[in-house]
Amino acid sequence: MLIIHGQIRYSIPEEMRKGSFVGNVAEDLGMNTKRMKSGGARIVSGDSSEYIRLDVDKGTLVVGERIDREQLCGQTSPCSLSFEMIMMNPMQLLSIVVEILDVNDNAPFFTDKDIKIEISESTLPGTRILQESATDPDVGINTLQGYTLHPTDHFSIKIQTGPDGSKYVEMYLYTPLDREKRDNLLLTLTAVDGGDPQRSGALKIHITVLDANDNGPVFMHPIFKASVTENAATGTVVTTVSATDADEGPYGHVTYHFARVPPDFAELFSLDENTGKITVTGQIDYEKNKQYELGLQAKDQGGQMDSTKVIIDVIDVNDNVPLITLTSFSSPISEDSISGTTVAIINVKDIDSGKNGRVECSINTKIPFAIQSSLKSYYTLVTDGVLDRERNTEYSITFTAVDEGTPPLSASKAITLRISDVNDNAPVFEQSSYSATVMENNVPGVSVFSVKAHDSDWGQNARMSYVLIDSQFNGNPISSYISVNAETGAIQAVRSFDYEQTKSFEIYIKAQDGGSPPLSSNVTVKIMIQDQNDNAPQVLYPVQTSSSLVAEMVPRSADVGYLVTKVVAVDVDSGQNAWLSYKLQKATDRALFEVGLQNGEIRTIRQVTDKDVVKQRLTVVVEDNGQPSRSATVNVNVAVADSFPEVLSEFTDFTHDKDYNDNLTFYLVLALAVVSFLFITCLVVIISVKIYRWRQSRVLYHSNLPVIPYYPPRYADTLGTGTLQHVYNYEVCRTTDSRKSDCKFARPCSQNVLVMDPSSTGTVQRMQSEKNILGEPDSPLEVSFLDTTLCGQQHCCLYSSRGMLRSLTLYYPWFLPLSIDQTSL
């Protein structure tokens, strides 16, 4: 609802500084500043907003820019600024008028600073010589008040008042002139105003005295009046002035000239000095000046002249279209707004006058809006019906202003009014339910599916947010399995799924709009886990163990197609990933056996003969049908024999054949490299020590000094330079089967017999007696591996005597012998 207040008037002097106080609007209206701030009070008039500014915080009007009354209003009095102040919630409109008071800041001035006049000496006293006027932009008491002349020996002045109230001066000859006495005179005409302090302007009059010319020109009228339409074409004749001179000849020829014409007026009109025709030479605009006043002079050749004034009235024509200004506009408005709600306020102006400036305003039809006249040149747009955003989201409203001129001129302004939404529609999913699939072993965070809901509302009311409704699955919250993006509705996996554990589950998603209160709807999404070939087949039979041997017996009388055994395997995957096929990869005799592709049955494909070996090993590959496929292998031992003892003797050593995997091979190679490095390091050290001792012995040999051997405790001299502990005895032990032998270093002192590994079989016998070795002092003590084929996996055995150790020969697993003499040891 629009509330219209009356009019408030203030008055301030011109030339006030920017920010000066004008008036307290809040106090004059009886309201506080909080109301002005909350209502967004502002000045809406376009022409005066730069001069007067509204201080909303204080509720006062202040000067926005320095105001020059003469520039703003010219000679118009009183001079005022009119504008409107508008406030919202509720909408209020106030008309404010600020009158600008004049100060005496302009001095009177003449159009010309100096003029020259020629006067005949025969001019009679009382003859009017000059008519002149000064201009003062100020008004009232500060404007032009009078004139003074100096000196006054021959001339006097009379102050006259024109029809418009302006004052001008007429100068008359007071005493006769005598050219022979004085042919040039200088007069000063001064114009003064009534301000305080008083200001003035001067005009220098240079008079040249001529010989006699008895009669001067005389205008037919003291004042000429004429009219011209605005926008008149260049060359249009406005009026013709005329003057007569009773003299004849050159003294009777009259010419016409402008006098006291402002420069901007002189650009609009021209005067034919011979005919007195005044014509249009510029663009005449009624809105700028409604009247022009021109001063004219008529001169003869003898120097006499007469003055007059021409007043030209400008006739207005309808040449300006109405101007529509959108003062206030509320967009969007709610679709539940009641009829009569104010939508916009416009200001319509036409700077033409009379009926050319009278304007009627209207809007387009068939829309639920109406326009009302609220204040002079102001119109209010209000609702006039029911608004429905779902039917019309916006309205295009066109304001049309038409004046009453002939022909009428019009202007239009279009605005687009948006209708804001009310949250009256719940979200709707694209489907009533959804189903999605995700491959097992997925990466956490992978996108599974996306749901989408629509809301026929708009803006925040249609902004969707998706929420995963809390529920339980397998005793865990559903949020530990799935997450939903609140903005996009994208469903993401929180964990990696295993098809073998979870086949499918359901989640419930709620779509909620952003209205107040919010509306929502739910949907069910079924998540199905797709199987992936991530499990290799598992062989259930035959059972593979490292400690026992399982063998299938085939009698030598077996015929073709004899069922030897059946490989049983399973795959925990499903579908084609669990379809298994069996293939024979390796076999001792591939022509004897075959494996069923689908059932894994191992059968003979020919008659068993006596030439077939007893021990048969088959390697069967079990492969699934996945992409890529996975497989497992199984070794099947088959004994081709008719009796168990025959099988037992052949399979005695079978349990010791072990297949080592790639990791064991890697560690064996690594151990071999480390042992090699240590061996080479020891070899270098031993050679270095040997060379060093050899050089020392050479020095002692050439020194001719007696050598006194030193024996550390518990050591004895053995034939010169070597030392060895007294109490160490060694024995070697060997079994009848070298592949099952194991020997260790015996403990020192009293123990002479080395105990064998319990897993070994066979008998123990003494290799050589201690006396035999001690009986040959120069014979080397040799230590060797009993079985070179198993030296890398067996222990070595050392046999020694109490005497001197002359030499030692070591055989390493790579069969590189190394001899070390007694000096090194």
Image: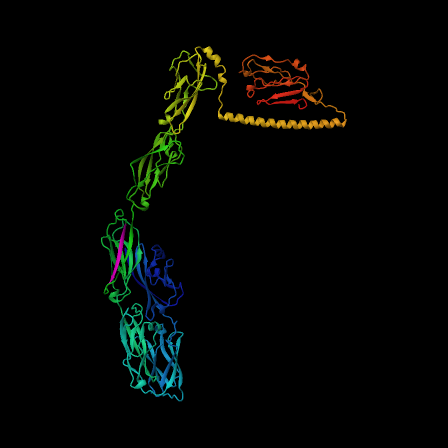
Q: Nearer the viewer, residue 534 or 566?
A: 566
Q: Is residue 753 left or right of residue 127?
A: right
Using the image as rendered, state which of residue 291 and residue 244 is in the foreground: 244
Find the magenta span and give its range.
394-403
Front residue of 490/648: it is 648
Residue 779 appears in the rendering = yes
Quadrant of the frame with the N terminus = bottom left
The total of numbered circles placed on residues is 0
- Name the image quarter holding residue 597: top left
Residue 462, above or below 231? above
Quick check: 801 left or right of 149? right
User: Does residue 689 appear to the left or right of 371 in the view shown?
Assistant: right
Q: Is residue 516 visible?
A: no
Q: Main secondary structure of the magenta part?
A: strand
Rendering coords of residue 528 (x, y %): 34, 31
Say if the magenta span includes residue 158.
no
